Amino acid sequence: MARFLRDAGIAVDRIVHSGKTRARQTAEILSTELLNAGAPEAIAGINPKDAIDPFVAEVNVWSADTLVVGHLPFMAGAVSCLLLGRPDPDLVAYRPGSVVCLGKDDAGAWHIEWIIRPELTASDEH
């Protein structure tokens, strides 16, 4: 996924993760290909059962392109809250390793720019 995104021209200014082992490992892998500078950082409040509203409030003031490595059901709820203003875990059909890119327009409304699932990046390379 990291190489696929890099080859598509994706780069980010910041990568944050929950601090849980798998999220940290994933963030480190993604950072080697996508992070413009610096290192991934652990943040509080994005664990699977954490409250979504504080995170959404924080995201709404971020200015840097940021990749968030988190967990279900939290990530599904956060994306839904940003898009719809309410949690709807069925809005995006997540699979482990999915990447959902959100963008914000000049009026401050969020939208989905693209979604990539791991099976779309599969190659014959072993």
Image: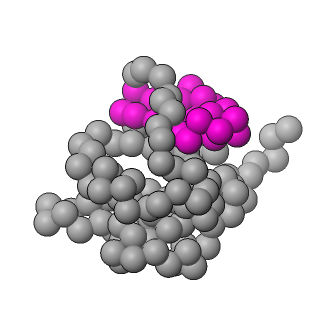
Give the colouring mode of the picture.
one colour
Whether residue 17 appears in magenta in the rendering, the answer is yes
Q: Residue drawn at (47%, 60%), measured in percent from left and top? A: 51
Does residue 23 sit above or below 78 in this rendering? above
Corner quadrant of residue 81: bottom left
Give the magenta part as a residue range.
Answer: 13-36
**12 with respect to 31 (left or right):** left
Does residue 44 sit above or below 93 in this rendering? above
Residue 16 in view in this figure: no
Residue 92 in view in this figure: yes
Q: Residue drawn at (24%, 43%), measured in percent from left and top? A: 63
**2 with respect to 124 (left or right):** left
The percent position of residue 68, horizontal first and vertical second, equals 48, 46
The percent position of residue 37, horizontal first and vertical second, equals 40, 22
Does residue 39 sit above or below 109 in this rendering? above
Q: Residue drawn at (48%, 23%), measured in percent from left and top? A: 39
Whether residue 79 appears in magenta in the rendering, the answer is no
Does residue 24 sit above or below 10 in this rendering? above
Q: Residue furthest right?
A: 126
